[in-house]
Amino acid sequence: MHTTSYSQVPIDIQGHHFTLDQFALPLNGDLVLGVQWLKELGPVTMDYNIITMSFSHLGHPVTLQVDVPLQANFSFNTTI
């Protein structure tokens, strides 16, 4: 499979500006920020109760928070 890549693409996430390398995947327009990007951030603190991730970027603290409503109830249907 051939993967198309784009270098140093500027993106804006919740008012914070980042520049990163991207790889084109057939995901209907979604953007996946993977381990490569997370590794560049250094230490990241996750809070799964309020769904945030906090880190330092260019010497400034950044906190990203989920921006879609979460469903409180999960149901798993397992057939053995």
Image (cartoon, grey):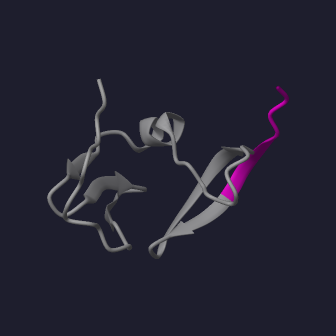
Q: Where is residue 11, by image quadrant?
A: bottom right
Q: Quadrant of the C terminus?
A: top left
Q: Is residue 74 above or below residue 79?
A: below
Q: Where is residue 2, by image quadrant?
A: top right
Q: Position of residue 57 (x, y in %)?
A: 40, 55
Q: Position of residue 10 (x, y in %)?
A: 66, 62
Residue 44 part of the magenta segment = no
Q: Position of residue 43 (x, y in %)?
A: 29, 40
Q: Is residue 73 above or below residue 5?
A: below
In front of the other: 13 or 42: 13
First to last magenta residue range: 1-9
**For the point 32% across and 74% down, which residue is it?**
69
In front of the other: 33 or 75: 75
Residue 5 part of the magenta segment = yes
Q: Quadrant of the N terminus?
A: top right
18 left or right, relative to 55: right
**For the point 62% across and 58% down, which residue is it?**
30
